[in-house]
Image (cartoon, rainbow, N blue to C red):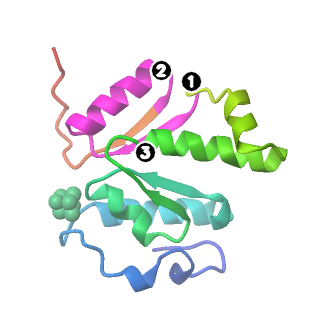
Amino acid sequence: MTLQTSRTLRDYIRVERLPTTWCPGCGLGIIMNCIVQAVDHRGLDKNEVAMISGIGCSGRMPVYVDFNTMHTTHGRALAFATGLHTLRWAQKSHLRAREAVLAAKFELEGQTLCVLGLGDIGGTLARKAQALGMRVLGVRRSRAPRPTRT
Ligand code: SF4
């Protein structure tokens, strides 16, 4: 891992949680490495970064990175992420949570979503997010074209 700032890997990884549960050779470690490097290269404050996941192998990534993290429930990562966004906005605007939820107009259109794993669940999420006008980045193991659904 190549870091640009004076931070070290220990600043980004919860080393007490290692080793990961991932299989040897699993690409998830490479993806986590790239995310940490991207945060470091952009000079982002890790306390301003949130990683929200659902279930499955990739869903365990928030366990290992030292950002603000939530390892949530099956198929609900987007709901938790938008809720967090709304409540952060409420906090900055000095609004009560109820007022913020009622006033929130969080638009999915134009937002970026990264989906790790494009199986049935990830692929369906990606298609629905695209239909809502989101920019979707997908990561999957195989380079083979994904079969289209009829
Ligand atoms: S995604 Fe596949 S290779 Fe990676 S930990 Fe899970 S089962 Fe193992």
Q: Which mark is residue 77?
A: 3
For mark 2, what is the residue?
132
> Mark 1 and 2 residues: CB-CB less than 8 Å, in contact?
yes
Q: Is residue 92 above or below residue 32?
A: above
* Magenta highlight on residue 126: yes
Which of the marked residues, 1 or 3, is nearer the chain's N terminus?
A: 3
Spot occupied by residue 147 in the image (x, y as percentages of width and height): 15, 27
Report, in whole angstroms, how far the alpha carbon at label 1 lies from the one at label 3.
Answer: 17 Å
For label 3, count other residues whose C-alpha is less than 10 Å away and answer few (under 14), some (14-19) or many (20+).
some
Residue furthest to the right = 94
Question: Based on the displayed image, in which of its 4 quarters is residue 146 positioned?
Answer: top left
CB under 8 Å between callouts 3 and 2? no
- Residue identifier under label 1: 109
Left or right, 146 with reference to 60: left
* Residue 17 against residue 139 in the figure, above or below: below
Between 30 and 101, which is closer to the camera in this rendering? 101
Question: Residue 127: where, in percent of width, then height?
Answer: 34, 25
Position in image of residue 90 (x %, y %): 75, 44
Secondary structure of the residue carrying numbered label 2: loop
